[in-house]
Amino acid sequence: MKKRTIFLILLLSCQVFSANKPTFINMQTADGIIHYPIIVSVTETDVIIDGQAAIPISSINSVTAYGSVKSILPILAGGCFGCLGVIPSGLIWKKMGGSTAPGNEVSTGALPFILGMGGSAVAGYTMVHKILASRSQNIVAMESWTFEKKRNFLFSELKP
């Protein structure tokens, strides 16, 4: 039962971190503003958003994009959050019968301890990265661009 629970927690955590994230903060078209679009594909004439809506490339006027972030601050935040994750993870480890006595093998509570520290580090990194990226957002005005330049820009923003 414990192995199944740990497996399900690990699986759900992986799905959360691999979920589709928005390509832009918003996209202004001739018809209106689309908030947090997820661009699935770019065809010859259209941009497919969320797998269903097709927007003509020629009608896109501007996009608000996430800015670039230097990686040192999110890495430091991830390390700090990982250190803070020791406290609740250690309590869970002790509650599950974890021991650090000499001669003992790694106990069953070690996996939640390691997952707690790692999860805290990843959460700290992603949270600070998101905050810094949203603070350094920039507006890309594409009204005067050619059709090919717009298409190439949108194609380069696709997530692999």
Image: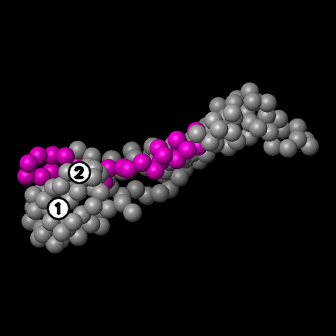
**Sequence order check: which comes first, mark 1 or mark 2?**
1
The answer to if 12 sits in the magenta stretch is yes
**Which residue position holds label 1?**
46
Residue 56 at x, y = what percent?
Answer: 13, 59
Residue 109 at x, y = what percent?
Answer: 74, 36
* Front position in the image: 95 or 42: 42
In this rendering, the count of numbered labels is: 2
**Stretch in magenta:** 9-34
Q: Is residue 86 left or right of residue 153?
A: right
Which quadrant of the figure has residue 54? bottom left
Image: 89 above or below 141:
above
Label 1 sits on what residue type? Asp
Task: Please tell me whether mark 1 sits on a helix, a strand or a loop.
Answer: strand
- Image quarter (top left, top right, bottom left or bottom right) of the N terminus: top right
Image: 79 above or below 1:
below
Label 2 sits on what residue type? Gln
Which of the numbered marks, if any, corresponds to residue 132? Answer: none
> Which residue occupies 58% across, 43% down?
10
Residue 156 at x, y = what percent?
Answer: 29, 67
Q: Is residue 129 visible?
A: yes
Q: Is residue 106 left or right of residue 151?
A: right
Q: Is residue 138 visible?
A: no
**Which residue position holds label 2?**
52
* Front position in the image: 78 or 99: 99
> Which residue occupies 27% across, 50% down?
50
* Front position in the image: 135 or 127: 127
Which quadrant of the figure has residue 7? top right
Q: Is residue 77 left or right of residue 65?
A: right
Q: What's the CA distance linking mark 1 and mark 2?
A: 12 Å
> Which residue occupies 18% across, 69% down?
44
